[in-house]
Amino acid sequence: MEHGGLIEKKRVVVTGIGAITPVGNTALEFWNGLLAGKNGISHITQFDSSNYKTQIAAEVEGFDPLDYLDKKEAKRTVRFTQFAIGASRQALTDANFAITDLNCEQVGVIIGCGLGGIDWLEEQNEVLLTKGPQRISPFTIPLFIPNMAAGQTAIAVGAKGPNSCPVTACAAGANAIGDAFRLIQQGYAQAMLCGGTEAAITPMTVGGFSAAGALSRRNHDPARASRPFDRDRDGFVLGEGAGILLLEELQHALKRGSHIYAEIVGYGMTCDAYHMTTPSVMGEGASRAIRLALKDGNVYPEQVSYVNAHGTSTAINDSVETQAIKTALGEHAYNTVISSTKSMTGHLLGAAGGIEAVATALAVYHDQVPPTTNLDNPDPLCDLQYSPHVATTLPMEVAISNSLGFGGHNVTLVFRKYCAQ
């Protein structure tokens, strides 16, 4: 509907969730794992890391693609795509949402990813080097390109609406959700599957991040390696998995009698335009993203109860993000509860924003804040309330989720407790 040439913004709600993560392979398992402080980090099993400086990661355990795909489909997808399809099917089932010939053109898929099928690419590169170009699989390109998670998910569930794949490093999953929110808000779709996926625990990825000095080397104590905001943090821990939300236009959801977890009301994104890997001084770009998202959602800083922080456990990120939160929320930052679920899941790169949006929506719904585990010795530069060690019960009106990525990408999503008015 238009008024004076302006499109009336539609309300958008979360009606389905799916998650495949290092602490649980369903959204319920994931949520219960977070609240219990379950840690998903251990020694790498997917390849021999004995000669690597970093030998730990947060792997998904017990995942069977045949739970979501038939054998032929499973052979023509790789791990990051399988995660996306699995979590998307979970979200549709959770929402009791059927995609049919009548609605398929109004249902879209946006799934962000950082590296795509790099495991498959590394495997085929080895074939090239050892057996020659004639032995490379004809499926090499379509299996590893990052957009295939969104494309293959749409094929699997029959969604013919808008389809896209943000590739904005560690902000990709959050960008996907924000972009899907915009499409529904502006009337281009009635429902969207959105989030992020990643399966990049590979020799090249671990080696590359390790060479950059970004990974924790606490190999002797994996469960305590990811320690956001702690004085003794020494880098992030690589993780894998997928987090998917089903977003719906409010009236569409109400007509179906849908269960509503939360309303998404704001989306802010900025660029530091500063450095390829280092965030801008004092978190200037991240603070602008928070402010833009709050303005977009017509939310005052004082209304924010909880911040699901990017909180990677790197020296620079955690102090800079802390400053960004202070700048954006002002004095209210000291009254806001913050946590980093990466302390338990590790850092899922392009999927991080997806699983953390799932956690944020559930936090709003249940009035509970997952803990920041391993926060034993707070960094003096990180002096806010980080919900250390144990979950916190907190009446919650508004929560935000931050995602920051290499290249200077900053994204903030704002979730509000659903109210009919």
Image (tube, helix red, strand yellow):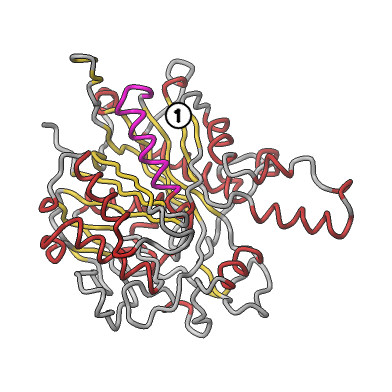
Q: In terms of secondary structure, what is the magenta stretch mainly? A: helix
Residue 156 position, x and y percent, is: 56, 33
Q: Is residue 180 left or right of residue 209?
A: left
Quarter holding the C terminus is top left
Range of magenta residues: 172-189
Name above or below for residue 224 compared with residue 387: below
Residue 174 magenta-drawn? yes
Q: Quadrant of residue 63?
A: bottom right
Instruction: Name the element at disc 1.
Output: strand
Residue 366 position, x and y percent, is: 22, 52
Q: Residue at x 47, y 83 (%)?
A: 221
Q: Is residue 38 left or right of residue 185?
A: right
Q: Residue at x 11, y 62 (%)?
A: 331
Residue 37 position, x and y percent, is: 34, 69
Residue type at mark 1 is Gly
Q: Residue furthest front?
A: 274
Reading the image, the residue beneath label 1 is 108
Characterize the local packing of mark 1: few (<14), some (14-19) or many (20 or more) Cα atoms within 10 angstroms.
many
Q: Is residue 414 left or right of residue 43?
A: left
Quarter holding the N terminus is top left
Name above or below for residue 230 compared with residue 12: below
Q: Residue at x 24, y 69 (%)?
A: 386
Q: Residue at x 26, y 76 (%)?
A: 381
For the image, the number of numbered tags is 1
Name above or below for residue 272 compared with residue 155: below
Residue 68 magenta-drawn? no
